[in-house]
Image (cartoon, rainbow, N blue to C red):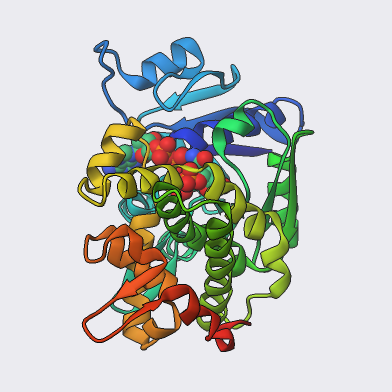
Amino acid sequence: MYKVTVVGSGNWGSVAAKLIASNTIKRSSFHDEVRMWVFEETLPSGEKLTDVINKTNENVKYLPGVKLGKNVVADPDLENAVKDANMLVFVTPHQFMEGICKRLAGKIRADAEGISLIKGMEVKKEGPSMISTLISRQLGINCSVLMGANIANEIAMENFSEATVGYRQNREAAERWVQLFTTPYFIVTAVQDVEGVELCGTLKNVVAIAAGFVDGLEMGNNTKAAIMRLGLKEMIAFSKLLFPSVTDSTFFESCGVADLITTCMGGRNRKVAEAYAKYGGKRSFDELEANMLNGQKLQGVLTAKEVCEVLTHRGWLEMFPLFRTVHAISTGRLPPSAIVEFSNEKSRYSLLKAWGGRSSICC
Ligand SMILES: NC(=O)c1ccc[n+]([C@@H]2O[C@H](COP(=O)([O-])OP(=O)(O)OC[C@H]3O[C@@H](n4cnc5c(N)ncnc54)[C@H](O)[C@@H]3O)[C@@H](O)[C@H]2O)c1
Ligand SMILES: O=P(O)(O)OC[C@H](O)CO
């Protein structure tokens, strides 16, 4: 029997728990109960979030108005939450995963399998590490990924969407993850390209920041479509430079072009970047995130920084004008308008033209 714990309980973490719980209760190969680790906090009412989730069956802070399923049990004790599970679903903002892995090392079942729903990467002096690799290395477990065009609030409403599981070798484990997540309104496909799937989910957040700047500047749909196309080119080029095994077909799965589109149309990264541009860069991303997202976290700004560290270290910065410009704007070194027009002392030229002349980076 498989026992599932969800490590994380934000907006997507809560929806993931709901999806999973609707399946574990129906399928005999899974224990009914789904444990969900909650990073504990005290609500304005003075109550603990975990207590309220267990009392109301709702994550009133990160997914208000949606019942999770009676078989979801919130647990604020990380070690207790994972100790019996042999299927671990990781779904926290990526910046917290290293600390969580350190706390979990040596505390999980030897036969556990993991899956990461986390869109992001870690950069160390030894080089970049995908979050699934961090989990695998630190916990000594096999870790697949699940990414896709998955705005959590829409899936919570049970509107049709798709997702992609990326796996390394273990097809049987991948099939089990597909079974655990698939519902009539959430269709999951597995592909053997864990890095490709994870990089799609990670890099689209940087492009979404660029799309938000375009929206804030009120430049219209054609400009945004151009940014998405150029962003996709950089996503493909970066992924293949980092991992030559990444396959073209992955970019046509839900994790690729579909996630890029939905994030640039309706995601949180886009929304906050739009506000950043509207305020002319005078309010920081940290301030806007805190004011606009009620505790939810952006991934794109930090990912742009991490990607640029890799580009700088490897001498690739010139090849990725969109990624480096997003980083420069989001850290206040360029104005939002630089997303389409870049100035320096010597020259002033259209970034879009520069990209057009650089078709050699296209894969
Ligand atoms: N929300 C979506 O629509 C969506 C969809 C697909 C993928 N994702 C990805 O899923 C991952 C998790 O996002 P989310 O939307 O579930 O979270 P979220 O942004 O809604 O919530 C933030 C979460 O972080 C927790 N937290 C705050 N400080 C913490 C700390 N110090 N240590 C550990 N946890 C802490 C909060 O309690 C909360 O659960 C991200 O990588 C995101 O890109 C999100
Ligand atoms: O709201 P965002 O920008 O974090 O994007 C959410 C999901 O990743 C969309 O698939």
| Total marks placed | 0
Between residues 124 and 300, which one lies in front from this camera angle? Answer: 300
Q: Position of residue 132 (x, y in %)?
A: 50, 61
**Residue at image coords 25%, 52%:** 281
Taking the image in four quarters, ligand 1 sits in the one at top left
Query: Residue 61's quadrant in the figure?
Result: top left
Q: Position of residue 188 (x, y in %)?
A: 73, 47
Query: In this rendering, does residue 116 appear at all?
Result: yes
Q: In this rendering, is residue 91 above or below 353? A: above
**Residue at image coords 45%, 83%:** 319
Q: Residue furthest right?
A: 184
Query: Residue 71's quadrant in the figure?
Result: top right
Between residues 330 and 63, which one lies in front from this camera angle? Answer: 330
Q: Position of residue 353 (x, y in %)?
A: 49, 78
Query: In this rendering, does residue 79 appear at all?
Result: no
Query: Residue 1's quadrant in the figure?
Result: top right
Q: Is residue 40 left or right of residue 84?
A: left
Q: Position of residue 285 (x, y in %)?
A: 27, 48
User: Which quarter of the rendered picture does the C terminus lie within?
Assistant: bottom right
Q: Is residue 166 left or right of residue 26?
A: left
Between residues 249 and 229, which one lies in front from this camera angle? Answer: 229
**Residue at image coords 60%, 28%:** 156
**Residue at image coords 55%, 80%:** 356
